[in-house]
Image (cartoon, rainbow, N blue to C red):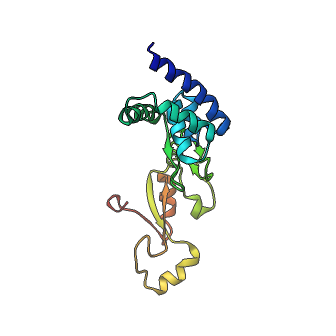
Amino acid sequence: MTDTTALRATILHKLETAIENDHPCDDLQGCDIALALSEGYVAWAAHLLTGATECEETETLYVEFAATFASDTELQAYLRTECDELCKLPHWTCEKCNSVQWADPDDESECTNCLHPHPGKPEPEDTTCESGVATLTNCEAEGSTFVDWMPEHLRASHDAAGNSGTWPLNGVLRLHVCADCAACLIEDDYATLVAEESK
């Protein structure tokens, strides 16, 4: 280990303690600084902290750390490496406040900054028969076709308008139903089976 490497390691050890003192945070999902520190990217954590707020102890040691590099270009390359490694960790961006959340995008969670929920993995599409909307009786079968059904409270005005218009602008509800319920529903003059090409 060269003198420079040894000196840098010593400063980084002190920097770690300084950051913990200046920025006591355990939010590993919403805080870049806390996560970087926990992952061992001390220089990047110090860089973020000194750029965000006044922190005398961290700033002093960070200046000493930077001085161990022959040029600013070398320092920036070192920081970029730590930043790139950190960015390989699972994360997602909150659609409401745009903050980065360090959590698996496939997991359900909420933004620690604004508490906006993150949906995680999309729920499987519900394909259960929807005939109960019309019959008021639940059917647990799987929907296999579509029926356009006019709610009773809209039928008079629909008749007065000459039964004009088409779904979804004419007030009908397009229900995903099973074959048996479809057969029952279309016995009603206000329900029609949707053609395959119209779905």
Q: Residue furthest left?
A: 197
Residue 22 placement: quadrant: top right
x%, y% of residue 190? 49, 72
Quadrant housing the C terminus: bottom left
**What residue appears at the point 35 percent right and 35 percent down from the top-left corner?**
73
Residue at 65% from the left image edge and 33% from the top image edge: 20
Q: Position of residue 95 (x, y in %)?
A: 50, 54
Classify 128 as above or below 174.
above
Residue closer to the observer: 51 or 118: 51
| Front-lying residue, 193 or 19 | 19
In the picture shown, does residue 175 fall above or below 79?
A: below
Horizontal side of 136 relative to 73 (left or right) equals right
Residue at position x 51%, y 60% in the image: 184
Residue 111's x, y, as percent? 59, 48
Q: Quadrant of residue 58?
A: top right
- Residue most extreme to the bottom: 160
